[in-house]
Amino acid sequence: MKLMNWGVFLSAIFFSWAASAAGQHAGGHGHHGSPIGELGSAAAVTQTIQVEMLDTMRFSPASFSVKQGQTVRFVIKNAGQLKHEFVMGTQKDLDAHYELMKKHPHMEHAEDNMLSLEAGKSGELIWKFTQAGTVDVACLFPGHYDAGMKAAIKVGSVASK
């Protein structure tokens, strides 16, 4: 029960941030207007990016390039022996979430912008990048983030016509 309560707590924090950033009511759907984008649909996917999570506390590759407005399917494989996660966010939000994870390392959570995988498992995350800039990626399990398990998604702006 405690794990569920922390999941609800983190969801409330994240969605209130996303809603305030987007000017929506709390508990709004997705991350519309968020600097990291929003949940994408499989029908809109224009690119697939393969990512491995490694026990050397690295993502491979560690950087990706996409275009603003593009919907990407991330096919993520945990190639290690430890549980890892792929969480997209702003640097500020990842830092704050990591501080909570250090205090509550067994907290389970699942949001549209994250995927947790046991050793040897694979999964997919589909995301639409609505704004140009950098979207940060990290594994927020205690010790992994500090060891440098981070990546960056460079979102190029679309030239106006």
Image: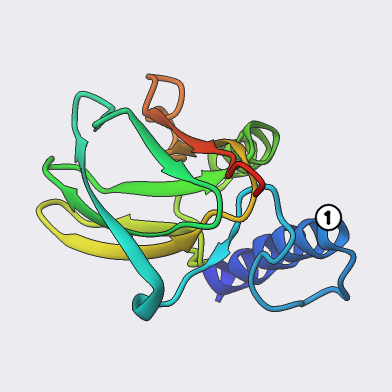
Q: Nearer the viewer, residue 45 or 2?
A: 45
Q: Which of 61/131 is in front?
A: 131
Please tell me which residue is depicted at 23% across the width and 64% down the height of the picture.
Answer: 123
Amino acid type of the residue tagged 1 in the rendering: Ala
Question: Which quadrant does the N terminus fall into?
Answer: bottom right
Give the vertical position of 107 relative to 26 (above or below).
above
Q: Which residue is mark 1?
A: 21
Give the x, y percent position of residue 101: 55, 43
- Seen at 20% across and 24% down, the residue is 56
Q: Is 86 displayed left or right of 120 in the figure?
A: right
Q: Is residue 77 left or right of residue 132?
A: left
Q: Which residue is nearer to you in this view: 145 or 125?
A: 125
Which quadrant would residue 43 be assigned to in this image?
A: bottom left
Q: Is residue 154 left or right of residue 161?
A: left
Q: Quadrant of residue 16?
A: bottom right
Query: Residue 51, how many percent across, how many down?
Result: 23, 44
Front residue of 127 and 157: 157
Which structural element holds mark 1?
helix
Q: Residue at x 54, y 54 (%)?
A: 129
